[in-house]
């Protein structure tokens, strides 16, 4: 047993008063004359014994009444742990998880409303003079100060749902740091009110201060019958005018019921572009395509939507992309190469291509990043400067296509291939071969042939180089010769890719340039070589977004970000300006799903699409028993108090003070006061 106000125990000295009264007995006796003194002597001795017992009982009752009354005012309690509460003044930090998952409905309302009510009940269980701090997922700067009870309750009433999901370890660190900066309070407690989703409840990162009294208050609700659009994406990076698009969409059914004929709508630039109906079984995932055509160049804003209740934040998936007018193609070759003419005929007059040719001795390495696709035609040598520039080009998203020279410098080529984590090039083979197998499922041949020919006429090859795949090389064979050697292989690297041919593009070596394969292979290499675009970003948490500069819109120190739906805008600093890229952090301005325009000097140069984090829909929750197990290793084992307990307030009191005993001592003091009165009145 311990005392909140132990100094009050000095009042126990008051027990001396009844003792002094009993000793001195300030009472005058009256003499009564009576003839038979002998009889009175016996009666007096008997009465004196009874009177002494009576006085002792009265004295004992008074002493005990005073003792129990003093103990009651000292506020005794039995602590629930070894940690002693030394002061009545405390600082209480409360974290309310107001993420989307807390909008789930329980029997008495949404989990967020229940959490807000419990937060008010918690602060009402603390005495006058207690200081409070409130933390939500928005981490509002206005809440970073100490609040009174009334201010705390007012701020809780204003708390609304948020798309941000704060990791539990970060919430704990924020409260600890702010409470450590507050002086004048020696007792500190932290309450964590959440549904404890597993993806954000990183208990392995939590190590609370031993001076903190930590209490977890979990909230549970029945599982919702929820449908969600998980994501959407394009298979190919390039977007071109009048290009047929296949948008892939993934929908998940998180309920135990089959959903039939669910309409899925695609809106592009505020126009309905495609509709598909979907039937999906319980707890299944379905993937399908929505087909449409880009009818113009520039920025395209799209969203895929379904109708589903009561969880609605994951019903829409926003995406945006840029349709570029032309692909910049560069051919690099030695002087006088006839192979350049084949590419000129293919690309020169195409409205989607901007073709340029430069001799290998005249190439400007600083201009390489202006192009999306580069063809190296029959180079025997690869200078070290060109190798480094090409490596950076592919890493940043470019497409590199290599036809080796007749007398290729194999060590120089293999140095480049090694850096690109692709297959190495070996000895020259002069035996006659033919292309034999074609990977018709590859991107280069998609929608090119109506059907696969059993014995097509394929190009001959009089000179080839042996291509040897590395052990860790992610090779995709596109065309294979009849000897089993790759004639064309693809290797991804960074954001780009390498297409590696095993033969020179020379009319004395091959008739590939005359065959039907030549046009779709080289044209689709260039067409799909656009810089990869991130068509959507998740909301929530700190995220630095790296964007590529555009020659017509170079960023200054500040960039204006504007929400397309509302017109609200803010200024974002450029965090890292290097080379062809710059970095921004749209948090915390970008809080709602939708489209956000980036502009510089009133000129919009990019529009980004943001979606709510789908982890809110997918992540399971920790049960009460799991929370007890996960936090059992902490230095101060926290209490887990189920929010559904009928004696919730009493549990909070016990967690805060332990088991309070002052009520019992008051009752005992009253009992002995009544005992004294009864003895005086009825003991004759």
Image (cartoon, rainbow, N blue to C red):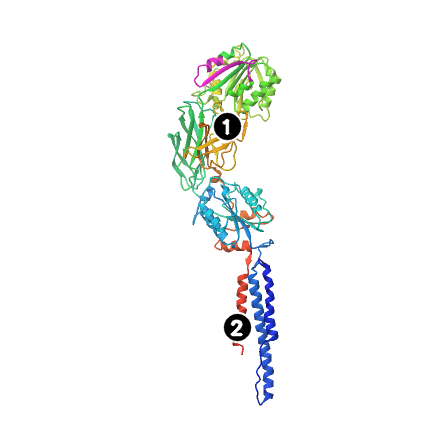
Which residue is nearer to you in this view: 591 or 32?
Answer: 32
Mark 1 surroundings within 10 Å by alpha-carbon count, few (fewer than 14), some (14 through 19), many (20 or more): few
User: Which quadrant would residue 79 be assigned to in this image?
Assistant: bottom right
Please state the extent of the stretch shown in magenta in the rendering. Answer: 342-364
Contact between labelled residues 1 and 2, with CB atoms less than 8 Å apart: no
Q: Position of residue 285 (x, y in %)?
A: 45, 36
Element type at marker 1?
loop
Please count the marks in the image.
2
Q: Is residue 231 visible?
A: no
Q: At which x and y percent is residue 271?
A: 37, 29
Is 621 located above or below residue 470 in the figure?
below
Q: Nearer the viewer, residue 504 or 28?
A: 28
> Magenta includes 348?
yes
Q: Which residue is mark 1?
A: 556
**Number of the label disc, if any, that sits on residue 339:** none
- In the picture, the disc for residue 677 is 2
């Amino acid at each position: 047993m311990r005392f909140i106000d132990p100094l009050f125990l000095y009042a126990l000295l008051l027990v001396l008063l009844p003792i002094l009264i009993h000793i001195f007995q300030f009472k005058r006796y009256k003499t009564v004359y009576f003839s038979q003194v002998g009889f009175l002597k016996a009666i007096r001795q008997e009465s004196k014994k009874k009177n002494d017992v009576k006085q002792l009982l009265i004295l004992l009752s008074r002493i005990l009444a005073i003792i129990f009354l003093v103990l009651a005012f000292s506020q005794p309690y039995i602590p629930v742990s070894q940690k002693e509460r030394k002061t009545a003044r405390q600082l209480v930090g409360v974290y309310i998880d107001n993420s989307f998952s807390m909008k789930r409905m329980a029997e008495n309302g949404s989990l967020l409303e229940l959490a807000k009510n419990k937060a008010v009940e918690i602060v009402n269980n603390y005495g006058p003079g207690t200081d409070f701090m409130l933390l939500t997922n928005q981490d509002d700067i206005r809440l970073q100060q100490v609040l009174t009870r009334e201010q705390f309750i007012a701020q809780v009433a204003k708390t609304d749902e948020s798309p941000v999901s704060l990791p539990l370890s970060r919430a704990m660190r924020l409260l600890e740091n702010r409470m450590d900066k507050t002086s004048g309070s020696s007792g500190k407690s932290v309450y964590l009110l959440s549904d404890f989703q597993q993806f954000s409840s990183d208990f392995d990162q939590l190590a609370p201060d031993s001076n903190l009294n930590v209490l977890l208050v979990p909230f549970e609700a029945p599982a919702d019958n929820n449908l969600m659009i998980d994501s959407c994406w394009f298979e190919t990076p390039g977007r071109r005018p009048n290009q047929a698009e296949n948008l892939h969409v993934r929908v998940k059914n998180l309920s135990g019921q089959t959903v039939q004929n669910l309409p899925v709508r695609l809106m592009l630039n505020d126009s309905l572009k495609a509709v598909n109906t979907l039937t999906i079984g319980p707890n299944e995932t379905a993937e399908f395509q929505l087909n449409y055509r880009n009818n113009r160049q520039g920025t395209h804003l799209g969203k895929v939507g379904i109708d589903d209740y009561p969880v609605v934040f994951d019903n829409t998936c926003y995406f945006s992309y840029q349709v570029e007018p032309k692909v910049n193609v560069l051919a690099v070759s030695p002087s006088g190469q006839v192979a350049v003419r084949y590419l000129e005929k293919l690309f020169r007059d195409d409205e989607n291509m901007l073709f340029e040719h430069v001799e290998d001795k005249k190439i400007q390495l600083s201009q390489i990043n202006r192009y999306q696709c580069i063809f190296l035609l029959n180079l025997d040598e690869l200078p070290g400067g060109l190798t480094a520039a090409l490596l950076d080009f592919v890493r940043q998203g470019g497409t590199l296509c290599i036809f080796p020279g007749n007398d290729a410098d194999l060590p120089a080529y293999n140095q480049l291939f090694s850096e690109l984590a692709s297959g190495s090039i070996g000895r020259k083979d002069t035996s006659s071969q033919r292309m034999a197998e074609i990977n018709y499922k590859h991107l280069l041949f998609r929608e090119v042939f109506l059907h696969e020919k059993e014995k097509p006429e394929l190009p001959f090859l009089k000179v080839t180089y042996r291509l040897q795949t590395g052990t860790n090389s992610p090779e995709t064979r596109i065309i294979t010769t009849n000897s089993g050697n790759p004639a064309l292989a693809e290797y991804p690297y960074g954001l780009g890719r390498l297409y590696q041919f095993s033969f020179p593009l020379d009319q004395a070596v091959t008739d590939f340039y005359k065959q039907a394969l030549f046009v779709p292979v080289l044209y689709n290499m260039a067409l799909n070589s656009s810089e990869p675009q991130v068509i959507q970003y998740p909301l929530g948490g700190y995220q630095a977004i790296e964007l590529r500069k555009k020659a017509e819109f170079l960023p200054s120190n500040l960039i204006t970000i504007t929400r397309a739906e509302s017109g609200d805008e803010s200024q974002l600093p450029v965090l890292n300006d290097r080379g062809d890229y710059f970095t921004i952090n749209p948090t915390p301005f970008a809080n709602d799903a939708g489209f956000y325009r980036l502009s510089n000097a009133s000129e919009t140069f990019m529009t980004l699409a943001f979606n709510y984090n789908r982890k809110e829909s997918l992540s399971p929750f920790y049960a009460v028993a799991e929370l007890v197990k996960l936090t059992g290793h902490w230095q101060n084992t926290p209490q887990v108090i189920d929010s559904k307990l009928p004696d919730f307030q009493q549990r909070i009191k016990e967690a805060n003070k332990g088991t309070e005993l002052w009520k019992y001592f008051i009752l005992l003091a009253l009992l002995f006061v009544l005992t004294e009165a009864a003895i005086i009145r009825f003991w004759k």
